[in-house]
């Protein structure tokens, strides 16, 4: 797979053309790139003495460039710009035999065709830049950064202010030198650029060299390189070459009798692009075709193991110094479409943020006791419990840790064993406590020293807090063994030191653990269990609960840069439990699941049925396009690909669509800054006369999304002639009097028609006095146009404001909270609190108004928690409230 994302071949050819002109053509006076006064056919305009003008057009194509196409371009170039003295057509790609023999067509000179091979073009341009730079008396450009200079210069040409402006030869020459010098300075301080070793083979791309260096750092040696497959492209009717940068296999480090087959691709961007759909689609398609070919040729599964797990890794790195720690996974994950994934392959995406942590951890570990090799620790789980796997560590990083936020490393010789635990979370006492627990658990308490590394630990600022946490374990051995340090972020000095510690296999000694006193039996470990960092088998019970679905696991894996097509919950649990999650990642996962516990705000819209039909038939006719639901919002719909209206089980003529939303603070890469939400629409058909659409939302953005979706559904229902034109909404100002509004809200404490509710108690009301009415003498001291009154307590129905007729007419009642008691299965006297309000109508300064909505909340008593399916109870209670609302709407003549 090509690794030059966002680089356009015709711009590189333009650079080559300009460099050639600077070297060999001393007669031109000025040049204009993409001149505005010429036709769109002109890419370069040259001016010479006596007003002579040469126009150059650059064309590139993946398909064979035919003579007739070139003839048409030449004719258009001449006819659209008839006043030029000379014309030139430069071609990038394969040309047909007839065109190959032509040196001109009409007045247009045909330049020598260049192959559409990005790496070849980059190599040619880098050689010319080097020669140009040396000719100016500058030092020879390092082969490490030549390619990056070409790419950066390409980007500069594509975005610079010189585009469309005429610039004279001397100014252009000076600006080119300034650009190259500035680019070289920037690149030489970039850690990823420094990671790429110089190469004597010019056609080895930068992204390939960086990826290979990372594979060497993690112990993945002897991988095959540049695995190619030639396939026929039906769209272009041409053969094309598919490429995977590296392919290798080894024994699984976390699973007994199993092998890991790994495919590695790499992409380099000067700056991360705004859209990744094309590149990700190309990568996934390439991987799938090569994987299928390997299976067909029986190269996989691996015969030396009982089972084989398949992995596809994509390193997508940027060399923009402002993006060294950027989280690119967040904006890329939505393009890993399910239909593009292979069911047998697990996909990992490694961006700058993940690569930075991985490399920083390893370089820090290499320089800690630098005469001892880095060994990666392999935790014990259900999948690797054989005696030879217990306490195992080795020179290869497990595939599952390639984009981990926690990396365990061992440095050992015959005299000492050091356990190093790296975590990308910022330091905090709570995080430290959980990582200490994890350290003891992983090592079973053995080891001469434990060293925990954070990105921001400062002994002067955090030292006392750290000592307090260590002492809280009440274990003398732990006090002696543990220390907290800051790991070295990837930089030039850290990378320069790698040469000294790169290969230390000759001293691969093992420490005899039997000499060491164990901490695993520490009685305090059980006390600290409330602060654990679950992994492996400990994580599985949490993941197996009914509250967590297979889609929940897939969404969360995608957030970490792990993608899988498989939707089998057992297999997903096996995958996620093989990972090491950081404290922040665990908290983020909990917050994602907890969104199901949040108060949901419900709003209803009503439509009269025009032509009666069942909802199943109606939804077969409608066409829902939800592509633009989040336009203008800092929110993503993470299940958009699979979102659709589906029938609600065991309910007639009821359909639901539920969109899970994600809001992330773009200024931070911390997982904890992600907020989850829900935007749900429930469509119900009532008595063959009415359609009720209920919006259930959590956040403000969820409400925007639900409103937009409702509008789409409404328009589609009208298009298929299912509903009448007018929508019915219950609004604050719809009531003819204040008394009617008060009685309407009060009616929700009357539940006589309910089969679930046993009691109802008004617990809270919010109102203000209507100064346009006659205020009873008793309340005149409370009248203030800006005063909103809240009453909370039990039995508020007996309040004078709610019980006396003249008091009812004098108040704007905006909100009421009712606590219902219910019986359901083994739950007796269950508590269900519902807030009924008019969307903060009293906050509207010019006109009090707002739509009527309800917000239910199930109080999780121990009886409720003991239910096998809490969601079913919540659905039953929600239906009961919906029935109650319909009953009250009819009672107050809001609907027929």
Image: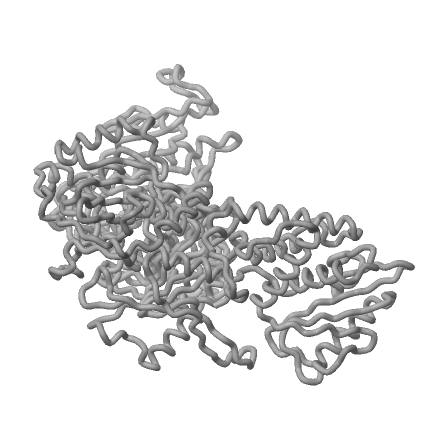
Q: How many marks?
A: 0
Report the residue that reaches farthest toward the front.
Answer: 506
Nearest the viewer among 611 and 532 is 532
In screen coordinates, is 669 left or right of 653?
A: right
Residue 539 at x, y = what percent?
Answer: 20, 51
Image quarter for residue 854?
Answer: top left
Q: Is residue 100 visible?
A: yes
Residue 12 at x, y = what percent?
Answer: 64, 62
Nearest the viewer among 11 and 192 is 192
Nearest the viewer among 39 and 371 is 371
Which residue shows up at 36% across the image and 77% down it? 294
Colour option used: one colour
Report the residue that reaches farthest toward the right.
Answer: 50
Nearest the viewer among 174 and 592 is 174
In screen coordinates, is 760 left or right of 802?
A: left
On screen, residue 180 above or below 762: below
Which residue shows up at 30% across the image and 40% down it? 453
In screen coordinates, is 42 left or right of 159?
A: right
Report the residue that reaches farthest toward the bottom.
Answer: 98
Residue 609 at x, y = what percent?
Answer: 42, 60
On screen, residue 739 above or below 680: above
On screen, residue 35 above or below 300: above
Residue 590 at x, y = what percent?
Answer: 27, 45
On screen, residue 6 above or below 439: below
Q: Is residue 587 visible?
A: no
């Amino acid at each position: 797979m090509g690794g030059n994302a966002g680089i356009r071949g015709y711009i590189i050819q333009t650079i080559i053309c300009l460099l050639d002109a600077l070297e060999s053509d001393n007669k031109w006076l000025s040049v204009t790139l993409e001149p505005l006064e010429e036709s769109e056919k002109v890419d370069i305009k040259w001016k010479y003495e006596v007003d002579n003008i040469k126009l150059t057009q650059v064309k590139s194509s993946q398909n064979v460039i035919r003579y007739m196409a070139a003839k048409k371009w030449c004719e258009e170039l001449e006819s659209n710009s008839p006043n030029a003295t000379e014309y030139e057509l430069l071609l990038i790609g394969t040309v047909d035999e007839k065109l190959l023999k032509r040196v001109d067509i009409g007045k247009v000179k045909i330049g020598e065709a260049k192959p559409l091979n990005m790496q070849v073009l980059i190599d040619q341009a880098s050689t010319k830049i080097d020669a140009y730079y040396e000719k100016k008396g500058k030092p020879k450009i390092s082969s490490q950064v030549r390619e990056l200079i070409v790419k950066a210069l390409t980007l500069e040409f594509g975005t610079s202010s010189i585009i469309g402006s005429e610039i004279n030869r001397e100014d252009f020459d000076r600006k080119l030198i300034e650009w190259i010098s500035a680019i070289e300075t920037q690149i030489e301080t970039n850690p990823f650029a420094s990671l790429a070793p110089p190469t004597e083979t010019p056609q080895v791309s930068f992204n390939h060299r960086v990826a290979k260096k990372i594979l060497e750092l993690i112990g993945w040696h002897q991988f095959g390189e540049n695995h190619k497959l030639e396939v026929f492209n039906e769209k272009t009717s041409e053969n094309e070459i598919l490429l995977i940068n590296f392919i290798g296999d080894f024994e699984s480090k976390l699973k007994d009798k199993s092998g890991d087959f790994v495919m590695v691709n790499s992409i380099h961007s000067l700056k991360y692009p705004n859209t990744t759909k094309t590149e990700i689609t190309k990568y996934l398609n390439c991987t799938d075709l090569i994987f299928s070919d390997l299976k067909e040729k029986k190269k996989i599964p691996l015969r030396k193991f009982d089972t084989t797990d398949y992995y596809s890794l994509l390193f997508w790195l940027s060399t923009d110094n402002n993006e060294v720690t950027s989280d690119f996974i967040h904006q890329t994950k939505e393009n890993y479409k399910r239909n593009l994934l292979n069911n047998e392959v697990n996909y990992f995406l490694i961006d700058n943020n993940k690569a930075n942590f991985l490399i920083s951890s390893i370089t820090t570990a290499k320089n800690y006791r630098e005469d001892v090799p880095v060994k990666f620790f392999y935790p014990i789980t259900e999948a690797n419990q054989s005696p030879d796997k217990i306490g195992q560590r080795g020179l290869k990083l497990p595939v599952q840790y390639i984009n981990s936020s926690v990396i365990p490393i061992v440095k050992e010789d015959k005299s000492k064993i050091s356990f190093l635990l790296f975590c990308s979370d910022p330091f905090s006492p709570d995080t430290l406590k959980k990582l200490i627990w994890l350290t003891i658990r992983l090592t079973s308490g053995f080891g001469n020293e434990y060293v925990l590394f954070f990105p921001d630990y400062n002994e002067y600022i955090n030292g006392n807090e750290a000592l307090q946490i260590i002492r809280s374990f009440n274990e003398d051995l732990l006090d002696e063994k543990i220390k907290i340090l800051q790991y070295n972020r990837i930089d030039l000095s850290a990378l320069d030191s790698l040469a000294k510690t790169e290969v230390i296999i000759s001293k691969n000694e093992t420490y005899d653990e039997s000499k060491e006193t164990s901490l695993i039996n520490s009685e305090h470990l059980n006390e600290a269990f409330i602060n654990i960092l679950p992994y492996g088998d400990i994580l599985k019970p949490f993941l197996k609960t009914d509250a967590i679905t297979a889609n929940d696991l897939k969404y969360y894996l995608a957030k970490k840069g792990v993608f899988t097509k498989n939707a089998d919950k057992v297999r997903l649990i096996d995958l996620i439990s093989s990972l090491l999650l950081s404290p922040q990642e665990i908290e983020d996962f909990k917050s994602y699941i907890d969104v199901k516990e949040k108060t949901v705000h419900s709003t209803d819209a009503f439509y009269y049925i025009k032509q009666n039909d069942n909802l199943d038939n109606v939804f077969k006719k409608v066409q829902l396009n939800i592509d633009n639901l989040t336009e203008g919002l800092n929110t993503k719909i993470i299940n958009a690909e699979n979102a659709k209206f589906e029938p609600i089980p065991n309910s007639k003529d009821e359909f639901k669509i539920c969109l899970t939303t994600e809001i992330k603070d773009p200024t931070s890469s911390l997982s904890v800054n992600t907020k989850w939400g829900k935007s749900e629409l429930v469509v119900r058909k009532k008595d063959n006369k009415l359609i009720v659409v209920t919006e259930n939302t959590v956040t403000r953005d969820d409400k925007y999304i639900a409103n937009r979706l409702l509008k789409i559904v409404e328009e589609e229902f009208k298009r298929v002639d299912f509903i009448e034109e007018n929508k019915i909404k219950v609004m604050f100002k719809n009531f003819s009097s204040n008394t009617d509004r008060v009685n309407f809200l009060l009616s929700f404490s009357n539940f006589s028609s309910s089969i679930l509710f046993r009691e109802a108690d008004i617990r809270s009301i919010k109102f203000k006095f209507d100064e346009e009415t006659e205020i009873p003498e008793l309340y005149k001291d409370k009248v203030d146009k800006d005063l909103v009154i809240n009453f909370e307590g039990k039995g508020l129905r007996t309040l004078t404001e709610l019980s006396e007729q003249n008091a009812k007419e004098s108040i704007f009642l905006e909100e009421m909270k009712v606590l219902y008691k219910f019986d359901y299965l083994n739950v007796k006297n269950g508590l269900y609190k519902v807030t009924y309000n008019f969307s903060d109508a009293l906050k509207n300064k010019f006109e009090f108004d707002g739509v009527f909505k309800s917000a239910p909340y199930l109080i999780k008593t121990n009886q409720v928690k003991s239910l096998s399916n809490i969601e079913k109870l919540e659905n039953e209670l929600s239906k009961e409230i919906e029935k109650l609302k319909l009953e009250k709407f009819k009672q107050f003549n809001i609907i027929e």
